[in-house]
Amino acid sequence: MTIKRIDKRKADEMRPMKAEVGVIPSADGSAVFQAGNTRAIVSVFGPHDLHPKFLQNPERGILRCHYNMMPFSGHGDRVRPGGSRRSKEISMLIEKSLISVLDLENFPNAVVDVFVELTETDAGTRCAGICAASMALADAGLKMKDLVSAMSMGYLDGEILVDINSDEDCDRGATDVPIAFIPSEDKLSLLQLDGDVSKEILLKLLEIGKQKCLEIDQVQRKALKNKFKERLK
Amino acid sequence: MNNSLKQHLIKSLQKNIRYDGRKIDEFRDIKIETGVSHGAEGSARVKIGETEVLAGVKMAIEKPYPDTPEKGNLMVNAELLALSSPEFEPGPPGAKAIEIARVVDRGIRESKAIDFEKLCIEKGEKVWSVMIDVCTINDAGNLLDAAALAAITAIKNTKFPAVKDDVVDYKNKTAKGLPLSRWPITVTVYKIGDCFIVDPLSEEEDAYDARLIAAIADDNNVCAMQKGGVEPLSIEEIGKMLDIIQKIAPKLRKKL
Amino acid sequence: MVDKMLIKDKEIVVPGDKIASGMGFLPGRGTFRKNSDILAEKLGILNVDGNVMKIVSLSGVYLPKVNDRVIAKVIDVLMSGWRFDLNSAYSAVLSMKEATSEFIQKGADLTKYFQINDIVVCKITNVTSQKLIDVTMSGPGLRKLRGGRLIKVNTNKVPRIIGKEGSMVSMIKNATGCNIIVGQNGLVWIDGEPDKEVITVKAVKMVESEAHTAGLTDKVAAFLEKETGVKTAKVNKK
């Protein structure tokens, strides 16, 4: 049994990925991550001073993520600018998926701001955001235990699909399981599920997802090295 | 910027040398790409030096405004994204972003770049709305001219989406472009001390005393204008600034 | 288990990269041990020092250190001193007694000495664990800067811009005739003739972007010679 994917991919085939680091000169760190037609651009500022003061943590720096879809980035109506409940939640999830690899102990009372902007979308936006953010944080020279890779797994018509697009996620109603993976820890730092799936299949799907995240990890590492290799010649 | 740094900048400008080596009436390299966001009906990326903006156009079928029942709607919005500069904060657009949006809007509207009557589907009931959003990616000065250029390029790149039973089918675009006639080009001239410059760097923007934004149509007529900055301008100065704008605009128009 | 290097010396490493495996290796700056492996925790260039693995950072904002000479901006005038922005997450305080050798009367107008937006070269004298920072204006070369222009550079490249015993910056100064002050915090102040300042900025940016390439000094010397026509651009190394 093989499912037909609108972009003719195999069930375990990811969309073409593109990654580039250092794309926003004004930022302290920046990166783009693209999977198919989903493209996230991220800038990192800081650690810098944090106001208002009550937000400060005297023990370590804090991480703040801001996820936003550009108004023209959706595949339907214009997305109204300004935060929504969805973007608030996703911002928090991105924060939580990254915070465990970051060491901000040397930056009491300060903040690292991560701005995630989607210039075009075709599902998997939070995952593309996490991939780009993780590269941008490394580009900003922050202390990190590892990079974080993320991707949305799916389950549709009895088949496990990797890196689902909006045709599968929104139009055909696949079970959607976005995950983020930390390779050196062998652990997941983002896990959500929308759909209907048995525990057995879910665990199998997560194992596959983990392996696929390692492929993303390689793309991220290569992009980070490329930025500096070009100048090192 | 403190006064001694500003005086130093003026001394350099007086010798016709910008901080990046350009002449005072010289633009940085301009790069334009179109079709950069597949979900939009039209889109463009404009880079002027290190400054980068994206513009996207979404189309929708809406009710016309009561005072223009036979005309389509235009909306321009600009977002100075916190992603693009340490100076920008997340949140609703501030005065600076709104000014950019409104200046771009007036340039397009007043030059009659779009034939709005052709956007009418059913008088008083249904018209096409053209919604342009400009988002900044990197601020290295002159977001204003970059935003205007991106907006006009995105309009030019726009194709109507398909319509099925009066509902827009965003997944399918038609081959039909927007009914366009004229091309407004927006150029801003900045006055720093007694010098006039175009395409400012961020530090030049920090130091300017006055500026004049003008949208120029194909025939070199002025379609929209806005004076900015704290210092007032004499008519003679305005004439000089318009000379510079009219000299630069055709060069930018060639990039379209 | 056999000790094994997994990444070569001077290669670029990324957080999480496995650099070496085996208990014979020790983690140095920018690396950490996980089980028997040494992993990178920063983006940078690997520097193998005997059996110690270190990383030289390539990016990151400035973190204030004692004895650093920095270029700062006055952002506030306090009851008994001034607050300076250090192009860092943390601001510093200059107290009256560190500001000048003059005696300042209690309640005197402190803006006579430093006003908001003034640019100064100062030295960091103390950094607490909570990053409260003191600076001083007393010491050779520490002063208020008048005129000139400021550029920002990657703070990790500052040592290269200065060069061995100041050789790189001296070479640029000699060729362009510009006065140049390089702050450890990634701000560079340049004052000279407009056309020469442009050359200076280009030379500094060249050092910044190619900081880790071989033969950089010769390359910069060639660039300066071409731009300025001054043949004796290269400063003889001791």
Image (tube, helix red, strand yellow):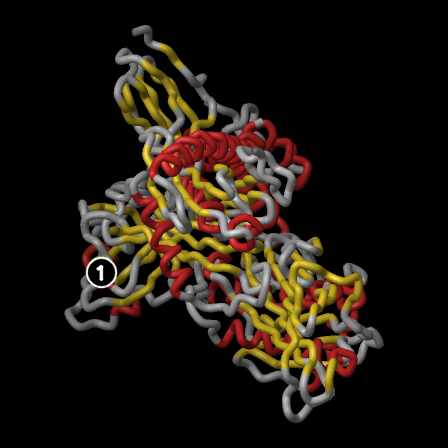
> Is the residue B74 above or below the residue A147 in the image?
below
Single out the residue that lies furthest toward the left: C106
Left or right: B199 with respect to C238?
right
Measuring 35% from the left and 51% from the top, which residue is drawn there? A93
Q: Nearer the viewer, residue C142 or C3?
A: C3
The image quadrant of residue B241 is: bottom right
> Is the residue B59 above or below the residue A6 in the image?
below
Quarter holding the C terminus of chain B is bottom right
Left or right: B213 with respect to C40?
right
- Label 1 residue SS: loop
The image quadrant of residue A201 is: top left
Q: Nearer the viewer, residue A157 or C114?
A: A157
Amino acid type at circle 1 is Glu
For label 1, the crowd category at 10 Å Cα-Cα, with few meaning under 14, some 14 to 19 and many 20 or more, is few
Q: Nearer the viewer, residue B135 or C218?
A: B135
- Residue C15, x across and y down, in percent: 39, 32
Say which residue label 1 marks.
Answer: C102
Measuring 31% from the left and 41% from the top, which residue is drawn there? A102
Measuring 40% from the left and 42% from the top, which residue is drawn there? A179
Left or right: C158 with respect to B214?
left
Which chain does tag 1 point to? C
Q: Is residue B165 visible?
A: yes
- Residue C191, x across and y down, in percent: 51, 52
Q: Is residue B145 visible?
A: no
Q: How many marks?
A: 1
- Residue C152, x across and y down, in percent: 47, 49
Measuring 33% from the left and 15% from the top, which residue is drawn there? C21
Single out the residue that lies furthest toward the bottom: B67
Q: Nearer the viewer, residue A52 or C93?
A: A52
Single out the residue that lies furthest toward the top: C2
